[in-house]
Image (cartoon, rainbow, N blue to C red):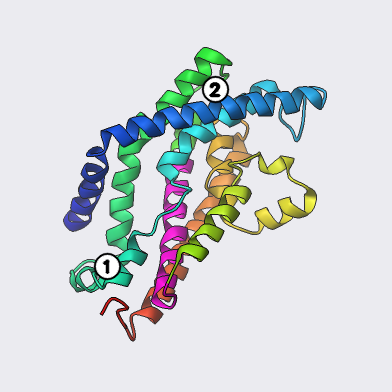
Amino acid sequence: MRALWAFAVGGFRRYAQYRSATLAGAVTNSVFGLLRAGITTSAVASAGGRIGGYDTAAVLAYAWLSQAVIAPVHVFGWTDVAERIRTGDLVTDLSRPVDLQLQFLAADLGRAAYVLLPRGLPPLIVGGLTFGLKLPVTPLPYLLGAVSLLLAVLLSFAGRFLLNLAAFWLIDLRGAASLYVITSNLLCGLLVPVSWMPTWLRTIAAATPFPSMVQAPVDVLSGRLTGAAAAGSLGVQAFWVVAVLLLGRLVLLRATRRLVIQGG
């Protein structure tokens, strides 16, 4: 546990060095929040005041909360493991007396802990000052939302780690990584709420772990899911976390049985 704590602290400190990038990311998230809030509220208004279960207040909460969680959840590209596989540096990681998957998971949790407030709060503040933001006034949605957000971070890491392991067999991961980002961003509820999608696409999304990365924590934090519905959402998230982490472990065991370093 001390070693894993050291990796987590290292992940926190690593991202704390990039203060300008953090500021730029907060500004970008806030600007995109303004765009998404404007577009989604216009869509709701043109649909008669309600669409896919969202009225204006609900869709504003969705737009700003989704912008707040995308940094800690990390829904975009990440190829740290793949790069270390390509260069051969992964040999050093494998030689440490700490499980490889847990090393990177601990570091990713440290990263998420650092970016949570400086990247998550600015969009919420901007949203409250511009469009207005209606959030729950009781503590339970935030407590459940914190658990949901943690599960989303774990699931996002599990998916990214599994994708990176493809570098054991692929010389260039960029194509697969781009396809993963496009697919996950569409199905996780980042672009539009999953309930706004056509029935066939909602069915596909429900069969994947992606809605548990953004849609689920946003629904819990906003109070859109409460009681048994919120508990059920957390259960689905926990299932996908365990399933994808286990799949990553199996693939890692298969890959390291015969390790060939592409970098020489």
Judged left or right of residue 199, residue 150 is: left
Mark 2–mark 1 CB contact (< 8 Å) = no
Q: Is residue 234 magenta?
A: no
Magenta residues, start to end: 147-171
Q: Amino acid at mark 1?
A: Asp
Judged left or right of residue 115, residue 37 is: right
> For the residues marked 2 and 1, what is the alpha-carbon distance in whole angstroms?
40 Å
Structural crowding at the residue carrying mark 1, measured as other residues with C-alpha within 10 Å and reported as few (<14), some (14–19) or many (≥20):
some
Q: Secondary structure at mark 2?
A: loop
Judge depth for marks 2 and 1 and give the one in front. 1
The answer to whether residue 61 is seen in the rendering is: no
Tell me: residue 235, above or below residue 70. below
Q: Secondary structure at mark 1?
A: loop
Q: Which image quarter is the C terminus in?
A: bottom left
The chief SS type of the magenta part is: helix
Residue 130 picture quarter = top right
On the image, the x and y values in percent for residue 220 come to 55, 35
**Viewer-closest of 219 and 161:** 161
Residue under the image location 75 percent in, 35 percent down: 52
The answer to whether residue 111 is seen in the rendering is: yes
**Viewer-closest of 180 and 107:** 180
On the image, the x and y values in percent for residue 177 come to 49, 61
Residue under the image location 81 percent in, 27 percent down: 47
**Viewer-closest of 127 and 205:** 127
Judged left or right of residue 138, residue 225 is: right
Q: Which mark is residue 99?
A: 1
Q: Which mark is residue 136?
A: 2
Residue under the image location 41 percent in, 70 percent down: 165
On the image, the x and y values in percent for residue 221 come to 52, 32
Q: Which mark is residue 148?
A: none
On the image, the x and y values in percent for residue 248 come to 43, 68
